Image (cartoon, helix red, strand yellow):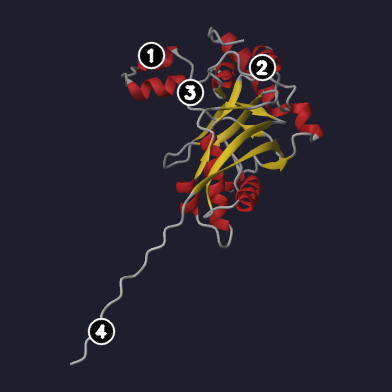
Amino acid sequence: MATTKAKDAEVSIVTLIEGEMKFCILGTSPLVFNRLPEKARRELLFPQKKTAATKAANMKHDPIAEFRASPYRMLDKKAPTVLAVLPTMFKQAMGTAALCTPGAKRTDIDRMVRVDWENLPCYGVPKVFCAITRSADMNRTPDVRTRAILPEWACRFTVRFEKPILREQTIADLLSAAGRVSGICDWRQEKGSGSFGSFKLVSETDKDFQRILKMGREAQEDALENWVAYDQDTAELLSWFNVEAKKAGHAVTA
């Protein structure tokens, strides 16, 4: 019986090289912050029982305090802005865009793309935004949520990726698509019900980008202290709330 000698298969391994690209991002729709409140995070870390008396003595909402607590912030007091966005937001948006882009793989984005690992300075002047939302319970109970909104916003960051599996044009195309089909932060395009947090790629010299870069730490600190309502509904709701809270003898954040 004739036998054949198996030939050893030669394994070829592609050498990965780190690529790097810097991007300037300009918002094309308002950005709605939704950081988990400090009170809620403390409750998760150290749950406490609430009696009926405690609930009655405390207000459910303190809108202006919630407004000031809603954005992510830069820890470095010397940072160019007070407000921040998380780098993971853009990586997740790119992953969502990969799901909608023929030939792209979300797993490649998850494993071979890195967006700056620290919070990213976010430029723009925040305003107070009150909106009716639905809770996640079975009855979808309505509630009012107060958050900071940036009518105009911009940021910039660095993306690192593995070449030659991913190329510069692929990264730019996916990030550009992410700005349209996903967006970042709350009520973003990805979730279906809203179209907030959308963005586009621009050059460093873009006039609107440069204009918004002037809305940094000083302008943000002033806007957080001397707040302005984003729209008429918010203004009317806050005006009514302050009157009713005062009647009930509750102290609210000014």
Of marks 3 and 2, the one in the foreground: 2
Q: Position of residue 116 (x, y in %)?
A: 54, 33
> Of callouts 3 and 4, which one flags the residue occurring earlier in the amino acid sequence?
4
Q: Amino acid at mark 3?
A: Pro
Give me the C-alpha separation between circle 3 and circle 2.
22 Å
Mark 2 is surrounded, within 10 Å at the Cα level, by few (under 14), some (14 to 19) or many (20 or more) other residues, namely many
> Of callouts 3 and 1, which one flags the residue occurring earlier in the amino acid sequence?
3
Numbered disc 1: secondary structure: helix
Image quarter for residue 7? bottom left
Circle 2 is placed at which residue position?
Answer: 217
Q: Position of residue 4 (x, y in %)?
A: 25, 84
Circle 1 is placed at which residue position?
Answer: 54
Give me the C-alpha separation between circle 4 and circle 1.
84 Å
Q: Which mark is residue 4?
A: 4
Q: Amino acid at mark 4?
A: Thr
User: Which image quarter is the C terminus in?
Assistant: top right
Numbered disc 2: secondary structure: helix
